[in-house]
Amino acid sequence: MGFVLGIGSAIFFAAASICFKLGQRGHPSDNGLFLSLLVNVVLLGTASLFLDWPTWTTGGFLGFIAGGLLGSVGGRASNLRAIRSVGPSRANAFLAGNPFVAAIVGWFLLDETLGLREFAGGALVIAGLVWLVRARSDDGSAPDHPSARGYAWAATAPLFFGFAFAVRKWSLILFPSTVIGAFIGSTAALIAVTVTQSRTDSLASLLGRNLRPPPPWFLAAGVATSVALLSQFTAFSYLPAWVVGILQGTQGIWTLVLGWLFLRDDERIDARLVGAIVLVAAGVILIGLEV
């Protein structure tokens, strides 16, 4: 069940990436982060009303907040910047680095085992990402010929996401509720994003731009990320954090497939892109053999 949930989370996050990219076409100044988080809070908060809350623990509560800030703010914001610049297929290929980061953090935070096979798999992941970056400059297949900054954002995202995996796993040990934990993290992320964006834009303008009327593709991305978060949190109940990171690392492959189906004008797939993703997938599989 844990593997099904982990793969399902990757598929829904990949679908959300496609929705974000489609929404960004008509909103050049908005990546969709605020509205997607608002949808997360509404959906997860509504579901939380019908659940019995477990015994309160301050550590679990603070852990969910930290996980939300790391994953839903740091990771998602970096990933969305990369999606706008380099396209969802290339941006999400970097997320194959999630398990390597989650394995290292889980080793320190959760005493999860980490061996030579994980390091070997991580080396394959890094090699695939280096190949991807070196191929980007002259292939003409990435939208708008993105600069190195877009790839820097893409490389930053797995650092946030991998750390968030381990923190969320630790929080669920202290406060065992996947839905409520996801709600707490999403709420913290929404507050942080609202405060940050309000510094350059009034709250009334921010709400008006996102709610009158709500951009449909960003709404769809919010629904998809809500389902993905629930699948991810539930997978932590069955698997170590780094294994969930492995399964999440397949997001780049699912995005490649969905991007080819729905973003053919933006996503022109070539052999080097496919080869790089296959290489990082091999690293993910090598790590997974240790389970």
Image: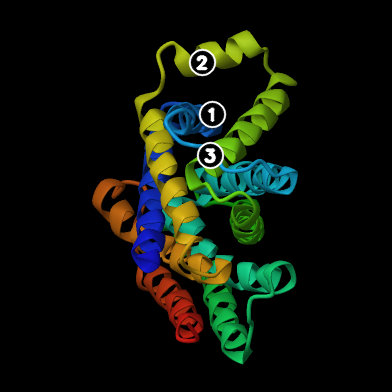
Hey, what amino acid is under mark 3? Ile
Give me the C-alpha separation between circle 1 and circle 3: 28 Å
Q: Which mark is residue 30?
A: 1
Q: Does the image show residue 136?
A: no
Eyeballing the image, is 104 above or below 23? below
**Pointers 1 and 2 in contact (C-beta within 8 Å):** yes
Hey, what amino acid is under mark 1? Asp
Quarter of the figure with the N terminus: bottom left
Nearest the viewer among 208 and 143 is 208
Q: Does the image show residue 195?
A: yes
- Say whether residue 189 is left or right of residue 232: right
SS assignment at label 1: loop
Give percent across and percent down for residue 74.
Answer: 66, 46
Q: Residue at x 65, y 48 (%)?
A: 67
Nearest the viewer among 107 and 269 is 107
For disc 2, the marked residue is 209
Q: State which tag comes first along the sequence, 2 or 3.
A: 3
Give me the C-alpha separation between circle 1 and circle 2: 9 Å
For disc 3, the marked residue is 180
The mark closer to the camera, 1 or 3, is 3
